Every structure is written in structure tokens, then in C-alpha cells.
């Protein structure tokens, strides 16, 4: 009787370990899907780190695919159509406004789900430089 109890405990431990290993593998696979761009300057690399730390890239993709928000690939310098049908060229000023007051200008086709971010100016500068690096060549 006593032996059986130990067997149950052992089976339990093995099952829990397998679950933990399984989840770890799944998380790894999901993370490895994220292809990060190669950056040729330090400020942009900091911008990428800031975007990761603040969760921006949970909603903004870096590879051109549509996410919860517009992709950042080719965003800088492009002409964006807003909810009211007007257009605006994505420049530094517009990006800064989009981060600090996202409700000010709504991009057409997206939900108004982005919250305001209160980031130090040096982080904002780095974020802008990062998105500039993702611009379509010739449009920045
Ligand atoms: C919860 C999802 C979410 C997160 C997190 C998020 N955003 Fe957004 N963002 C959006 C959506 C949706 C839009 C488009 C609607 C709008 O204009 O607000 C947007 C719009 C933008 C735009 C304008 C894009 C364009 O093509 O005109 C910029 C720039 C931007 N976000 C930057 C950021 C930065 C920087 C962060 C992190 C500090 C961030 N976002 C975090 C959802 C998000």
C-alpha cells in the first residue's frame, strides 16, 4: 500500500515536469518567430529594446504583417490614412504624438486600443530612430 502511494507521487512529479518542459518549449518557439531587424546604430538598438520592454511589439509587428496596430515596417515616411479620411505623412512629430496621445489621430482600420505612454524623452528619441531604421528606403 505504502509503495503504491510513492508510485503515485513519482508519476505526479514526472507529469508535472513534462508539462513544465512542454510549456517552456512552446514559449521558445513563439519567441523565435520574432525576427528582429539588424540595426546599424546604437540609438536604434536601444529603441528596439525599449519597444520590447514596453510591450509595443505585442501590437506592432516589425515584419510588415498586420497586428493589433499598424506594422512598423515601412511606417516612417509613409502616408497614413486616418479614421476621418484625411492623410498624414508619418514623421517624428506624428510618431511622438501617437505615443504620448494615441487618441489624437486614429489610423483607419484599427481599434482605439493603444494607451498613452509616459516615457522619458531619451526613450522617445530612441524609439523614433528605431522606426526610422524600419522605413522603406528612400521614404524617410
Ligand atoms: C495594445 C496594443 C498596442 C500597444 C501595446 C502599443 N500600440 Fe501603438 N497603436 C496601436 C493601435 C491599434 C494603433 C492604431 C490606432 C491608433 O491610431 O491609435 C497604434 C498606433 C501607433 C502609432 C501610429 C502608427 C501609424 O501607422 O500611424 C505609433 C507610432 C505607435 N502606435 C507607437 C507605439 C509605441 C512606441 C508603443 C510602445 C511604447 C505602442 N505603440 C504600443 C496599438 C498598440
Image (cartoon, rainbow, N blue to C red):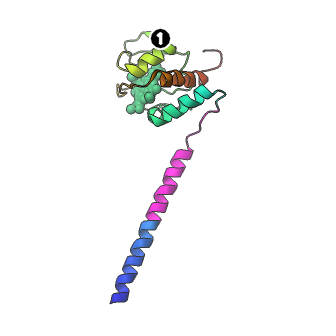
Residue 66 x/y as whole percent: 48, 30
Quadrant where the N terminus sits is bottom left
**Residue wearing tag 1:** 88
Q: Secondary structure at mark 1?
A: strand
Label 1 C-beta lies within 8 Å of the nearest ligand 1 atom: yes
Q: Quadrant of ligand 1?
A: top left
Residue 130 image-quadrant placement:
top right
Name the residue: 34% across, 88% down.
2
20 part of magenta stretch:
yes
Q: Is residue 10 visible?
A: yes
Residue 110 image-quadrant placement:
top left
Q: Is residue 96 left or right of residue 40?
A: left
Name the residue: 47% across, 36% down.
53
Q: Is residue 131 left or right of residue 81?
A: right
Q: Is residue 90 visible?
A: no
In front of the other: 102 or 84:
102
In front of the other: 19 or 111:
19
Q: Residue lying furthest bottom in this view?
A: 1
Q: Which residues are magenta?
A: 18-38
Name the residue: 55% across, 40% down.
34
Quadrant where the C terminus sits is top right
Residue 11 image-quadrant placement:
bottom left
23 part of magenta stretch:
yes
Residue 82 drawn above or below residue 12? above
Q: Is residue 96 left or right of residue 46?
A: left
Residue 107 x/y as whole percent: 41, 19
Amino acid at each position: 500500500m505504502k509503495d503504491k502511494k510513492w508510485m503515485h507521487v513519482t508519476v505526479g512529479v514526472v507529469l508535472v515536469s513534462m508539462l513544465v518542459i512542454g510549456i517552456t518549449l512552446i514559449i521558445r518557439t513563439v519567441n523565435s518567430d520574432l525576427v528582429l531587424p539588424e540595426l546599424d546604430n546604437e540609438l536604434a538598438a536601444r529603441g528596439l529594446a525599449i519597444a520590447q520592454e514596453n510591450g509595443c511589439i505585442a501590437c506592432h509587428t516589425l515584419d510588415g504583417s498586420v497586428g493589433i496596430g499598424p506594422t512598423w515596417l515601412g511606417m516612417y515616411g509613409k502616408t497614413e490614412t486616418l479614421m476621418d479620411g484625411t492623410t498624414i505623412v508619418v514623421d517624428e512629430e506624428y510618431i511622438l504624438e501617437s505615443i504620448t496621445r494615441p487618441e489624437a489621430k486614429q489610423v483607419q482600420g484599427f481599434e482605439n486600443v493603444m494607451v498613452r505612454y509616459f516615457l522619458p524623452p531619451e526613450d522617445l528619441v530612441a524609439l523614433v530612430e528605431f522606426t526610422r531604421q524600419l522605413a522603406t528606403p528612400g521614404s524617410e
